[in-house]
């Protein structure tokens, strides 16, 4: 009888110990998509016209600035609409000469610059292969506000080691009736989140709409081409 009670006691103790030491497997943590975030962005533009060859001589330096909202669609994809003040245009060297006559050297250079200001609404779809890095693509809709054509001519004369320089400048507003008010473009870019709030972004915009209100017969479309580099801050 004592052996029976002893066996029952040992069995009960082992069952109690097994219950107390039962391993509980935690459920995997489910990664949820990030919340909607608002932000601001600003940076520089380098633009030219489609009829020009890509060169440092024809790049018009401008800027962009505005607001954004980032809308996560899943863990990897998000939608980012933006509203930007966008400065585009182009620059070209009309003529450049360097003539030496006797002891006198004369250098002349004439440049022509076009500045066109738009309100642009990019609609970018972003995909994140990693947590911080993303690539993006999407359409950009723009509305022309105003613009200006300007020209600069510089004449430098050197005689006996002494140089004198003369500069002449002129500018005129672009006639809005000659410009297509609406512009459609496609954007392709990439970005990196430096911190949770601060990020850097690079983007190339290829316009699809002829900027002229009436395209002359037999001519190629005149479009914008622009590179953008800037910073963004999400709240």
Image: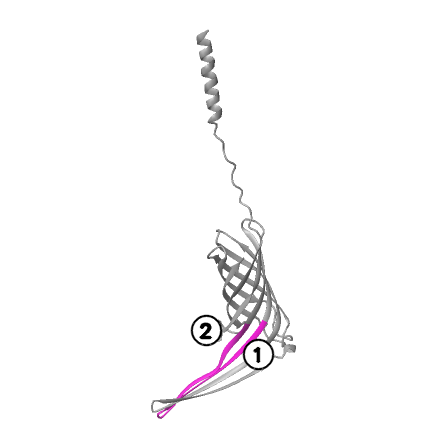
Chief secondary structure of the magenta span? strand
In this picture, which residue range is highlighted in magenta? 88-117
Provide the secondary structure element on which disc 1 rests: strand
Q: In the rendered image of this protein, does residue 154 appear above or below residue 137?
A: below
In the rendered image, which quarter is residue 213 located in? bottom right
Q: CA distance from mark 1 to mark 2?
A: 21 Å
Q: Is residue 122 magenta?
A: no
Q: Is residue 98 magenta?
A: yes
Report x, y in % for residue 3. 44, 9
Provide the secondary structure element on which disc 2 rests: helix
48 or 53, nearer to the observer: 48
Report x, y in % for residue 189. 51, 60
Q: In the rendered image of this protein, does residue 15 appear above or below residue 121?
A: above
Q: Count how many numbered circles sit on residues in the image.
A: 2
Q: Earlier in the sequence, mark 1 or mark 2?
A: 2
Report x, y in % for residue 92. 50, 78
Which mark lies nearer to you, 1 or 2? 1
Q: Residues within 10 Å of mark 1 (few under 14, many from 20)?
A: some
206 or 53, nearer to the observer: 206
Query: Residue beneath label 1, please?
Result: 148
The C terminus lies in which quarter of the figure? Answer: bottom right
86 or 232, nearer to the observer: 232
Report x, y in % for residue 178. 64, 77
Q: In the rendered image of this protein, does residue 197 appear above or below residue 217?
A: above
Q: Which mark is on residue 56?
A: 2
User: Residue, x 51% and y 61% (percent of image)?
Assistant: 232
- Asked if the residue under mark 2 is in contact with the one under mark 1, i.e. CB atoms within 8 Å, the reply is no
36 or 45, nearer to the observer: 36
């Amino acid at each position: 009888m004592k052996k029976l009670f002893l066996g029952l006691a040992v069995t009960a103790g082992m069952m109690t110990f097994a219950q107390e030491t039962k391993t509980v497997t935690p459920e995997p943590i489910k990664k949820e998509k990030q919340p909607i975030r608002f932000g601001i962005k600003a940076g520089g533009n380098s633009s030219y016209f489609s009829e020009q060859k890509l060169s440092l001589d024809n790049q018009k330096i401008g800027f962009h600035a505005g607001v954004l909202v980032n809308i996560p669609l899943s863990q990897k994809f998000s939608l980012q609409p933006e509203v930007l003040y966008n400065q585009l245009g182009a620059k070209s060297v009309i003529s450049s000469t360097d003539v030496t006559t006797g002891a006198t050297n004369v250098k002349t250079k004439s440049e022509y610059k076009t500045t066109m200001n738009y309100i642009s609404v990019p609609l970018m779809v972003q995909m994140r292969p990693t947590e911080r890095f993303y690539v993006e693509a999407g359409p950009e809709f723009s509305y022309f506000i105003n613009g200006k054509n300007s020209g600069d001519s510089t004449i430098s004369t050197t005689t006996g080691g002494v140089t004198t320089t003369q500069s002449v400048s002129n500018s005129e507003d672009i006639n809005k009736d000659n410009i297509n008010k609406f512009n459609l473009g496609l954007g392709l870019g990439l970005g990196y989140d430096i911190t949770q709030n601060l990020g850097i972004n690079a983007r190339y915009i290829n316009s699809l709409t002829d900027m002229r209100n009436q395209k002359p017969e037999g001519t190629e479309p005149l479009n914008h081409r622009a590179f953008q580099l800037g910073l963004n801050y999400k709240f």
